[in-house]
Image: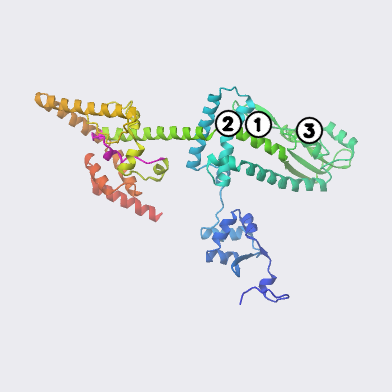
């Protein structure tokens, strides 16, 4: 039989308890409602909260225990730990997500290209809107867990939800002001008398005047004033002030009064800080959405910017891999390069190095090789072998392939000449000394690289064994260091 009863006037203790919803539990402890539902699957959390089952639902009673006490018990088992303000702010602003940051960077570059393409002169207001658009897009993407490129679909919903939240926040403050007779005033003489003193008797008159401001420091450490827009304000309500006349007054202190460092002389019963945000109408929201979509770059421009950034990243990645092979004196072929390159920035963040040869040839075609080799120079006289498939219809790829064949022929011809001369032994000895010097200087960085990659599973032992011998490294020492770090990680 269920612990709960549907009968009226039941004597069961459960029917006499006061239960709270999952949403109320989430707001009380500062977590999401989904976190509450998932955590209730744990028997330890149910015991701490005193949750009981009603049919297929888990209900949480209001036990009357302090929130801080329950939070401490949950923190002991690693649940619902208090999030620091910096982390909460970063989540709300859409920060600390590398994929979102990359998409925001693409959007910022696309906006710059769009402005140059249209060749239009920007006003201060338009320039400010363009600078703020990537930040707003990042916030919307974080709130709706979508890509930055899909933000226009959710922007109107985001503005409506934010406007409704501002209405709810203002409602409590307006209710308090009305209860103390500070929202509107029916006595114009009293209002004029207070205004001459620098005070206000009506909050509605204060937020619609546009005269109040706040001070801030700019980049040159100069104090500037920022005026509040109509419908918004930050001020202080004074209740029960008794001045020289001996009468009790209720009035409002503008923010500029506080910024100037002035103080009241007299007795005050209560001082209450009020903040009112501007609430927009439907027409204003529609206009803001329309302007946002007008500034948003086209899909083709976003695709083009994404493609250009991906190619630039691959060129830099391949250039670094080519530099490693040239320092080692290894042939520059696809079979060698595929093991020390990454597919994309996401794979590099996760430490997933390497790919199959077919995928490497698809991501790094001949034109990428040609761009990556620019500016590298010849660190060592090595044989150039790319091993990449070049499309016949690609003129740059065909040119690069012919250049590669000519370089190989020159290298073979040079080797034949060296064999026939008496200086061949000296040149070979000099090349060997250069290779040993380069490998000796890179031994310590290569040791750290192999240990880090093997610790997180980014490299195979076969690959590490082949390259450790080139630098004179002992594979047993590398294995011992990897084991030591893994055991230290488990212990921590």
Who's the residue at 31% across and 52% down the image?
A: 483
| Label 1 to label 2: alpha-carbon separation | 20 Å
Mark 3, residue position: 209
Q: Earlier in the sequence, mark 3 or mark 2?
A: 2
Compare marks 1 and 2 and give the one earlier in the sequence.
Answer: 2
**Position in image of residue 212 (x %, y %):** 75, 33
- Quadrant (top left/top right/bottom left/bottom right) for the N terminus: bottom right
Label 2 crowd bin: few (<14), some (14–19), many (20+), radius 10 Å? some
Q: What residue is rendered at 69% in x and 46% in y?
A: 164
3D distance between C-alphas at marks 1 and 3: 21 Å
Q: Which SS class for mark 2?
A: helix
Q: Which mark is residue 234?
A: none
Q: Which mark is residue 216?
A: 1
Judging depth in this view, the residue of 45 and 119 nearest the camera is 119
Question: Nearest the camera: 59 or 80?
Answer: 59
Lateral position of residue 145 relative to residue 307, left or right: right
- Image x and y of residue 54, in percent: 62, 69
Q: Which mark is residue 131?
A: 2
Query: Mark 1 packing: few (<14 Cα in 10 Å), some, or many (20+)?
Result: few
Q: Viewer-proximal residue, 161 or 150?
A: 150
The range drawn in magenta is 327-344
């Amino acid at each position: 039989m269920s612990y709960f009863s549907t009968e009226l006037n039941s004597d069961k203790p459960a029917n006499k308890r006061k239960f709270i919803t999952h949403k109320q539990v989430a707001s009380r402890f500062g977590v999401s409602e989904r976190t509450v539902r998932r955590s209730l699957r744990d028997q330890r959390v149910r015991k701490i909260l005193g949750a009981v089952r009603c049919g297929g639902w888990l209900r949480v009673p209001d036990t009357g225990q302090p929130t801080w006490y329950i939070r401490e018990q949950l923190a002991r088992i690693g649940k619902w730990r208090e999030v620091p303000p910096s982390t909460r702010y970063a989540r709300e602003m859409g920060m600390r997500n590398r994929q979102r940051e990359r998409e925001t960077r693409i959007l910022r570059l696309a906006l710059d290209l769009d402005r140059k393409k249209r060749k239009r002169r920007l006003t201060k207001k338009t320039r400010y809107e363009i600078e703020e658009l990537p930040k707003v897009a990042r916030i919307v993407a974080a709130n709706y867990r979508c890509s930055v490129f899909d933000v226009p679909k959710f922007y109107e919903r985001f503005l409506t939800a934010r406007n409704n939240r501002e209405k709810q926040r203002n409602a409590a403050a307006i209710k308090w002001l009305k209860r103390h007779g500070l929202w509107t005033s029916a006595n114009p003489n009293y209002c004029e008398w207070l205004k001459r003193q620098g005070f206000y008797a009506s909050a509605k008159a204060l937020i619609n005047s546009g005269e109040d401001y706040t001070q801030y420091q700019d980049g040159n450490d100069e104090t500037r004033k920022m005026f509040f827009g109509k419908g918004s304000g930050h001020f202080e309500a004074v209740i029960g002030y008794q001045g020289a006349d001996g009468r009790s007054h209720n009035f409002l202190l503008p923010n500029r009064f506080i910024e100037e460092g002035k103080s009241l002389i007299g007795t005050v019963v209560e001082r209450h800080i009020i903040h009112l945000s501007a609430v927009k109408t439907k027409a204003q929201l529609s206009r803001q959405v329309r302007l946002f979509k007008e500034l948003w770059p086209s899909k083709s421009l976003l695709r083009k910017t994404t493609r250009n950034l991906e190619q630039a990243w691959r060129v830099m990645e391949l250039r670094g891999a080519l530099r490693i092979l040239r320092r080692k004196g290894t042939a520059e072929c696809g079979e060698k390069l595929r093991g020390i390159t990454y597919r994309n920035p996401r794979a590099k963040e996760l430490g997933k190095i390497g790919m199959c040869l077919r995928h490497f040839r698809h991501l790094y075609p001949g034109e990428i090789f040609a761009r990556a080799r620019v500016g590298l120079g010849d660190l060592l006289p090595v044989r150039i072998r790319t091993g990449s498939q070049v499309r016949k219809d690609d003129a740059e790829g065909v040119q690069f392939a012919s250049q590669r064949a000519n370089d190989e022929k020159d290298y073979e011809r040079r080797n034949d000449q060296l064999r026939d001369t008496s200086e061949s032994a000296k040149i070979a000895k000099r090349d060997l000394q250069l290779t040993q010097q380069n490998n000796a200087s890179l031994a310590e960085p290569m040791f750290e690289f192999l240990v880090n990659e093997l610790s997180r599973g980014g490299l195979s032992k076969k690959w590490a064994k082949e390259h450790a011998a080139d630098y004179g490294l002992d594979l047993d020492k590398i294995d011992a260091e990897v084991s030591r770090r893994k055991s230290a990680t488990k212990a921590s």
